[in-house]
Amino acid sequence: MTPQPLVDLAPLARMLLLGALIAVLPLAWIGWRYRRGHPVTRWRALTVLTLFLTFDLVLFGAFTRLTDSGLGCPDWPGCYGNASPIGAHDEIHAAQTTLPTGPVTHRKAWIEMLHRYLATAVGALITALAVVAWWQHRRGRRTVVPAPSPWWATATFAWVCVQGAFGALTVTLKLYPAIVTGHLLGGLALLALLAGQAEGFEPPQRVLSPALRRVVWIVAVLSLVQIALGGWVSTNYAVLACTDFPTCHGSWWPQMDFVHGFTLRRELGATAGGDWLPFTALTAIHYTHRLMACVVLAALLWLAYALGRSGGASTMRWALAFAGVAAWQVASGLSNVVLGWPLAAAIAHTAGAAALVVLLTTLLVRSRPVHAWVQGERAQAGQVPVAP
C-alpha cells in the first residue's frame, strides 16, 4: 500500500467550494432578514452571526479533541486525498479493521471532517466580512457616512489564516501538544477579534472608571494564562492526573515534575528526549492549572464585586455575568475531576472559557476611551488622517 502523504492539496478546491456553499446559507439569511436595513446594519448582523458560529466551532473543536478524533483523517486538508470520508471509505475501513480502537475510524473521520467543513465555512464568512468592511469603508469616505474601521475585519481575516495553518500542523505533527494548545488559544483569539469587531459598531459607553477598567485588564491577563494552562492540561490528557479534590493523591503538595511537564518542544506523551512522559509531569500540569484556578476565581469574584458596587443597572448586569461564568467554571471543572472527565462537563468547561473571553473583550471595547472613537469616526469620513 502506498503511504498517504500528510499534506495532499488535491481536494483543496472542493473543500473551499464546500465551505463557501455552507457559508451561503447564513449570508442569504442575513441578506433576507435585513433586506431593508442600512448596509452597516447588515454588516453588524453578519459579524454577530459569525461570532456565534465561531463559538460553536470552538466547542466542536473541543468535541473533536475530546473524542480522540483529531487524527480521524490523518492527512490535510481532505481525508485520504478525498473531500469527504465517503471517498475514503476503503482506506478508513482498512485502518479501522487493523486497529478498531485506533485514531482512524468511520465515526472519528466524520467528526474530524465536519470540524474542517465548519472551519472552512467560518473562514469564508470572515473573508466576506473583510470584503464588506473595505467596501463599506470606501463607500463611507465617498458619502461621508460613518462606518466602523475595517482593520478589525482585516486582523480577523489574517488570524483565521493563521488558524488554518495551526489546524494543518495539528494533523501533520500528530497532535503535538504545543501546536494543539496554540490552536485552541487561536480559536479563542478569533472569538475576541470578532467580539471586538461586533462591539466596534457602537460608540463607547462610560460603563467603567479608569481604575475599574484596569481591573478588567488584570482579570483578562490572568484568564489568558489560566486558559493556556487549561489547554495544556487537555492536550496532554492530564485531566485525571488528580482524581481527588481538594487534595491531589491525598496530598496538598503531591510529587510533581515541572521540568518535563512544561517542556513545550516535545511530542504527545513523551519527554524532550523521547522517553515516556512520567506521571509526575502530568500531575504538575494538572495541579498548576488547579492552583491558578483559585487565583482566577478570586480575581473574577473581585471584579464582580467591584462592578456591583460601582452602581448602575448596566454594571450590575456585568457583575452577574462574571459571577455566573465563575460559578459555571467551578462546577464544570470540579465535574471533570470527581466524575471522571465526562464529555459534557469537558465541553461545558471550554464553553465557559470561551464565554469569558467574549465577555472580557466586549466590556473592554465598550469602555474604550471616547476620544479614540471620535478620532476613528473622523478618519472614516476622511477628515483626519489617522494611521490604522
Image (cartoon, grey):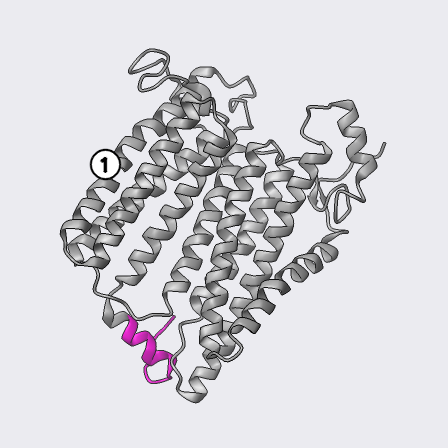
* Residue occupying the point 48% across, 71% down: 43
Residue 378 painted magenta: yes
Q: Is residue 73 visible?
A: no
- Left or right of 114 on screen, residue 351: left
Q: Where does the magenta region start and end?
A: 373-388
> Which residue type does callout 1 highlight?
Ala
- For mark 1, does the 10 Å Cα neighbourhood hold few (<14), some (14 to 19), or many (20 or more) residues? some
Query: In x, y percent, where is residue 370?
Result: 24, 70
Query: In x, y percent, where is residue 38?
Result: 46, 79
Q: Is residue 377 above or below residue 364?
A: below
Residue 285 painted magenta: no
The residue carrying mark 1 is 298
- Left or right of 100 on screen, residue 323: left
In which image quadrant can residue 76 be found? top right
- Left or right of 355 on screen, residue 33: right
* Residue occupying the point 58% across, 38% down: 64
* Residue occupying the point 45% across, 44% down: 185
In which image quadrant can residue 261 be found? top left
Badge 1 element: helix
